[in-house]
Image (cartoon, grey):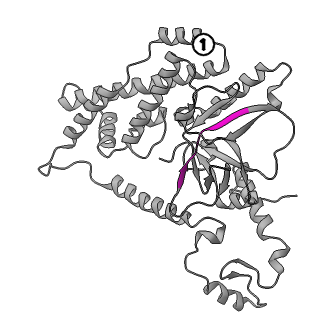
Amino acid sequence: MQVQYGGRVTDDFDKRLLTTFTHVWFCDVLLRPGFEFYRGYRVPQTRNLQGYIDYIDGLPASDTPEVFGLHPNADITYQINTAKGILDTILNVQPKEGGSQGGETRENVVYKLANDMLSKLPKQYNSFEVKEALQRMGPLLPMNIFLRQEIDRISRVIKEVRSTLTDLKLAIEGTIIMSQGLRKSLDAMYDARIPDKWLKISWESATLGFWYTELLERDYQFRQWCVHGRPKVFWMTGFFNPQGFLTAMRQEVTRAHKGWALDSVVLQNVITRYNKEDIKSQPQEGVYVHGLFLEGASLDRKAGKLVESRPKVLYEQMPVIYIFAINTTAGKDPKLYECPIYRKPQRTDAKYVGSIDFETDYNPRHWTLRGVALLCDIK
C-alpha cells in the first residue's frame, strides 16, 4: 500500500520520485550506527525535544544539492533561475513611457525590428501545393496527417505575425490608430519579449530573438518535408505536438504488421553514436530524432550509458536517437532508467512528451534522485 501527500503528486514521475525517496531513505539502513543522509546530516541521537531543536539549529543555513541526491550543478541552475526571476520583475515594472534621452525612441526601435522581421518572415503556405504534396506522399498515412495538422498551426502563426508587424508599422507611421493590443505588442517587442497574441498560438521561449529563429527553423523543416519528402532525421523540438508525432509513428508500425494491436505496441529506443549530419538514409521502421538535451547527467557516447554530469555543464546535446516500436506485453527492464522527455525545462505534465530508456551501471534510482530528463528545448 502507498500513501502520498496530496498536492505534490501530479503525474507518474512525481510519484516515482517520492517512492524513490521512500525506498532510499526510509529503510533499515537508517537505523545503523553512523548512518548519514549526507556528510554532516545524520540522525540525531537524542531522546528529548531540546536535543532535536539544538541539532536542527546546528544544521547549515542553506543545503547543498547533494543532500537531496542532486548533482552540484543543480546549484548553478538554481542561481541562474533566481537571477532571471529578479531581472524579469525589474523589466516588468520599469516605466514604458517617457521622453527620449537623446537615443532612438521606442517606436523607432520597434519599427526597424518589425521591418527586419517582415523581410525574413516565410511566405504563407499555398493550400493547393500542400494538398498536392500530401497526395503524393499518401494523405491517409498517420505521419502525413500529422504533418498537415502541424502546417495548419504554423500557418496560423505566420499569419498572426505578419498581421501584427504590418499593423504596428502603420500605427507607428500614424496611418492607423495605435490600439491597446498594438501598444502591448510594441512594449513586448521593445523588451525582447514575445507578444501575448503570438504566445497564445505558438510556443514559449526565453527571448523574442530565440522565438523568431525557432519560427524560421520550424517552417524550414515543414517545407523541406513537403518538397523533398519525409526527413531522414526529425527535429522533434520543431513540432507543436511531439506526442502526436510519436503516436503517428506507433500507428505506422502497427499498420505495417498484420495482427498487431496499437494498445500492445510500445516505444523502444537505441542511443546511436551519430550526429544528424551522419544519417544518410531513413530507418526501415521507426524514426531518427535529433536536437534533444540531457539534463542532470552526462552520456558515455561509446557505451551509450548515463554517467555523472561534468562540472559546470548543465545540458548535454544528445546524439541521434533511434525510436521504434515493438509488439509486447512484457514490462520494462528494471535495470534501465526510464527518462522522461519534456518540451521545455519546466517539468510539468503539460510539457511531457514521452520517455526513453537509458542503460546505466548505476541503480536507476540514482538518476531519479538526480532529476535526469531529456529536454526538447533549453530556452
Position in image of residue 251 (x %, y %): 73, 24
Dividing the picture into quarters, in which one does residue 326 lie? Answer: top right
Which residue is under mark 1? 137
Name the residue at 60% across, 13% down: 137
Residue type, numbered disc 1: Met
Quarter-of-image position of residue 54: bottom right
Label 1's element? helix
Magenta stretch, residue numbers: 315-324
Considering every residue shown, the one lying at the far left of the view is: 102
The verdict on residue 317 being magenta is yes
Q: Is residue 250 visible?
A: yes
Q: Is residue 174 above or below residue 316?
A: above
**In the drawing, does residue 196 fall left or right of residue 282?**
left
Residue 163 horizontal side relative to residue 111, left or right: right
The image shows residue 261 at horizontal and vertical percentages of 83, 25
Of residues 44 and 322, which is closer to you in this image? 322
| Structural crowding at the residue carrying mark 1, measured as other residues with C-alpha within 10 Å and reported as few (<14), some (14–19) or many (≥20) | some
Q: In this image, 269 relative to 107: left or right? A: right
- Considering the whole magenta stretch, tell me its main secondary structure: strand
Say which residue appears at 34% left-offset and 34% top-offset: 181
The answer to whether any part of residue 152 appears in the image is: no
Residue 281 point in image, percent of width and height = 60, 25
Residue 45 lies left or right of residue 216; in this view the side is right
Instruction: Give the percent coordinates (x, y) of residue 14.
Output: 70, 54
Residue at point 53%, 8% (across, down): 132
Q: Camera-side residue: 257 or 161?
A: 257
